[in-house]
Amino acid sequence: MLTGRRYRLDFTPEQAEFAERIGGACRSVWNTALEQRREYRRRGAWMNYVPQAAELAEAKKEHTWLKDVPGHCLQQALMDLDRACRAHGTWKVRWRSKSRWSPSFRFPEGGKVGVERLGRKWGRVKLPKIGWVRFRWSRPLGGEIKSVTLSRKGSQWYISFLVDDQAVTPGRHAMPNTALGIDRGVAVAATTSDGDFHDRRFVTEGEKIRYRQLQQKLARSRKGTANRRKTIAAMNRIMGRVTDRRGDFCAWTANRITSRNAVVVLEDLKTKNMTARAAGTLAQPGKQVAQKQGLNRAILDKGWHRLELALTNAARYTGTAVVKVNPAYTSRRCHACGLVTEGNRESQAVFVCKNPGCGHADHADVNAARNILNAAGHAVPACGDLAVGRSVKQEPAAPRGTPHQPAPELEGIPRL
């Protein structure tokens, strides 16, 4: 099974400068090839990888800055562009901006990459035209190297090994008769149908204040100045810590959920569409734009899509089936009687069924998670327990914490 191993690189200043040049050349090749594809589309013609790779070979004879960098990295940039254009269309593929795109490039021939261990904490890898580079050996490689990708995050470079660990997806889960529904929200990142709440604060109050101060400083700085670059670097350091915490939370949660459940059911949410920028009209400029921006920040801060990717990745090793269902009315439907009405959900956390013959009360997110599980064909009793030894007349236990708590303030890095 193919998997990734990511480590922190320890470049020398000369190696870091050369890596920046490789990334800049790949960005230039990407943008030039994309412009060529769009020009062909304007004329009603097509352009693909094969002729562009031949033109790249000719361009290397005329431009020494292309010849100095590894040719395989440039070819991989063309392959990535070809794959993106086929998947999304030529006009939807974005340019790679020098100021906003972080340099990244890939060496496809993993068999030609040498790796040696220098000690308990450090190792080194030999890369084409770069030479031996030290990296922080924080975990074993655990397999045969297929390709190597270098990327920069802020001021730090990282190396990612794509390895084949020889693992095989189990045909049967260790706990085959288990199933779980997950409701993703803005107050709690993930609420399960068995009443568990998975959440974590990804940004501290001090980081929020500091980030807003840096935003204000950035707005007052002039473009191209050293102070502006320092401010952006400080903002990237804060955002990098937040991103790492979110990734750790998603991986930790996905590992525990998939190891205990043979089926995991999620809502089929289009996060990219849900977090699209709100726009006002000429008649009502900026109407509800601030509210929409706050909702977008909260959704992105909780990492809905990243959690889904982490569940899918972890499921490969446990044999868990990840199922997506239609999200319509899952938050308004009563799990006990099936009544759908907007009045059922009294607040963010309180759900009380308005059916006179039912009156079922529960935490709103837990009720939604059970509806999600039901939508996939897995019945859950009103008490929310899949165990056969528990009475179906028993009332559900109160979720962890206060069951009917007011909606907390939306979290996330503030943006001006």
Image: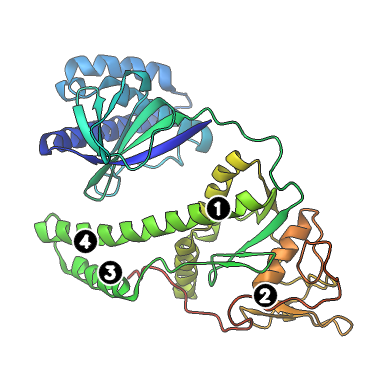
- Residue at 34% x, 76% y is 205
Percent position (x, y) of residue 114?
29, 23
Of the residues under marks 2 and 3, which one precedes in the sequence?
Answer: 3
Indicate the amino acid at tag 4.
Answer: Ala
**Considering the numbered disc 3 on the image, is that residue within a helix, a strand or a loop?**
helix
Q: Which mark is residue 211?
A: 3
Which label sits in the foreground, 1 or 3? 1
Indicate the amino acid at tag 2.
Answer: Ala
Task: Work out whether residue 34 or residue 157 is closer to the camera in this orientation and state it.
Answer: 157
Residue under label 1: 254
Say whether residue 201 is left or right of residue 366: left
User: Considering only vertical position in the picture, is 50 above or below 169?
Assistant: above
Label pair 1/3, CB-CB below 8 angstroms: no
Label pair 1/4, CB-CB below 8 angstroms: no
Residue under label 4: 234
Q: Which mark is residue 364?
A: 2
Of the residues under marks 2 and 1, which one precedes in the sequence?
Answer: 1
